[in-house]
């Protein structure tokens, strides 16, 4: 496990340019929860992350639903269509963009969002009021301290949040108790290396994939620097930036599979694409023919990689038994 890497130095420089000195200073707190909150409360950096790229979103849709134009919220809603008054809990919901979509698609569902960031939930509540969505509630509380009722929920969702939780085994068992008979746990999650400590062989593949991108499109967001190599994150920066980040991500699938029946489970990659596209994604928001071909090349490279490797990102539906 590496303590600090060249990637860490570059990332600090980029974060200062993108978010300012105050964001970095917030990381020098003795309270881990404060550092985690500063990460979630920070405004998103337009164009710096892979999830901002339309072609990436289409890729996820296709790998999860089989249709590049159909998102997983619609896919899940169709699967549970006909069930009455579903009680739906989303844990670590943040600004609730996915939960609001579920609420609009399913006016008969009762949706509860819980997150420890009151600031993000206030934004979500404002959107719900503006859009006249009435079947959704927001609870600003730490899930570790929240009194989860037994055999109450029909669906519990984690969208990119479960990898921030510790003691995965005990936590999943607690959620299992809170689901009704035949209730479902739904994941859309990172399940790769703890603390993003990719093994050397994976970093090698990431750099091979990065080399498929022409230099003009490797210029780092809001800088005059180029991304010529990916070094991986050091453990020190991971803990300072967000003590909860991928803390036990490798344990998620084994624990969930042990406690639930797998209804379906689909990988959608990210092993290479997420680190490759980080801080250069802005080049691929608006596409010309050259950029589109570049994206096709790196998609194909990751597809070949996934033939023999488990996906770092997984969508799954798991039933309580």
Image (tube, rainbow, N blue to C red):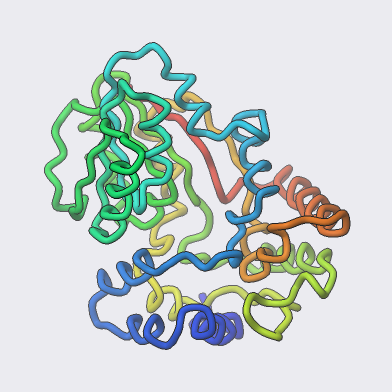
Which residue corresponds to the image point at 35% horizontal and 53% vertical from the top-left?
A: 94
Residue 150 percent location from the top left of the image = 15, 30
In-image side of 96 versus 4 (left or right): left
- As rendered, which of 320 and 296 lies closer to the eye? 296
Residue 42 percent location from the top left of the image = 39, 69
In-image side of 291 versus 110 (left or right): right
Toward which corner of the image does residue 39 lie, by quadrant? bottom left
Number of numbered discs on residues: 0
Please, is residue 202 above or below residue 101 in the view? Answer: below
Toward which corner of the image does residue 246 lie, by quadrant? bottom left
Residue 236 percent location from the top left of the image = 43, 80
Quadrant where the C terminus is found in the figure: top left
Which residue corresponds to the image point at 59% horizontal and 80% vertical from the top-left?
A: 7
- As rendered, which of 207 and 161 lies closer to the eye? 161
* Residue at the top extreme, as displayed: 82
In-image side of 109 versus 230 (left or right): left
In-image side of 185 versus 85 (left or right): right
Which residue corresponds to the image point at 52% horizontal and 65% vertical from the top-left?
A: 196
Please, is residue 47 above or below residue 162 in the view? Answer: below
Please, is residue 261 above or below residue 139 in the view? Answer: above
- As rendered, which of 86 and 129 lies closer to the eye? 129
Residue 293 percent location from the top left of the image = 86, 53
Which residue corresponds to the image point at 62% horizontal and 43% vertical from the top-left?
A: 268
């Amino acid at each position: 496990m590496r303590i600090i890497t060249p990637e860490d130095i570059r990332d600090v420089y980029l974060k200062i340019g993108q978010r300012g000195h105050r964001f970095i200073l917030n990381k020098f707190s003795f309270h881990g929860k404060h550092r985690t909150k500063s990460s979630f409360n920070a405004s998103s950096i337009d164009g710096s992350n892979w999830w901002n790229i339309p072609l990436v979103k289409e890729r996820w849709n296709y790998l999860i639903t089989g249709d590049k134009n159909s998102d997983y919220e619609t896919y899940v809603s169709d699967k549970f269509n006909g069930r009455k008054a579903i009680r739906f809990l989303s844990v670590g919901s943040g600004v609730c963009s996915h939960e609001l979509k579920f609420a609009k698609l399913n006016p008969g569902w009762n949706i509860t969002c819980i997150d420890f960031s009151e600031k993000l939930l206030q934004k979500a509540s404002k959107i719900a009021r503006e859009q006249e969505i009435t079947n959704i509630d927001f609870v600003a509380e730490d899930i570790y301290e929240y009194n989860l009722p037994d055999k109450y929920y029909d669906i519990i969702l984690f969208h990119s949040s479960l990898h921030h939780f510790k003691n995965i085994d005990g936590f999943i068992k607690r959620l299992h108790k809170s689901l009704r008979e035949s209730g479902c746990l739904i994941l859309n999650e990172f399940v790769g290396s703890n603390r993003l400590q990719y093994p050397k062989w994976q970093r090698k593949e990431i750099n091979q994939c990065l080399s498929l991108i022409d230099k003009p499109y490797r210029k780092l967001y809001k800088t005059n620097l180029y991304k010529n190599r990916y070094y991986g994150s050091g453990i020190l920066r991971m803990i300072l930036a967000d003590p909860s980040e991928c803390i036990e991500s490798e344990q998620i699938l084994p624990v969930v599979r042990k406690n639930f029946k797998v209804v379906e489970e689909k990988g959608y990659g990210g092993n290479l694409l997420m680190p490759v596209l980080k801080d250069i994604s802005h080049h691929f928001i608006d596409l010309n023919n050259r950029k589109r071909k570049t994206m096709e090349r790196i998609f194909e490279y990751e597809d070949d990689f996934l033939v023999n490797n488990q996906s770092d990102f997984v969508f799954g539906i798991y039933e309580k038994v």
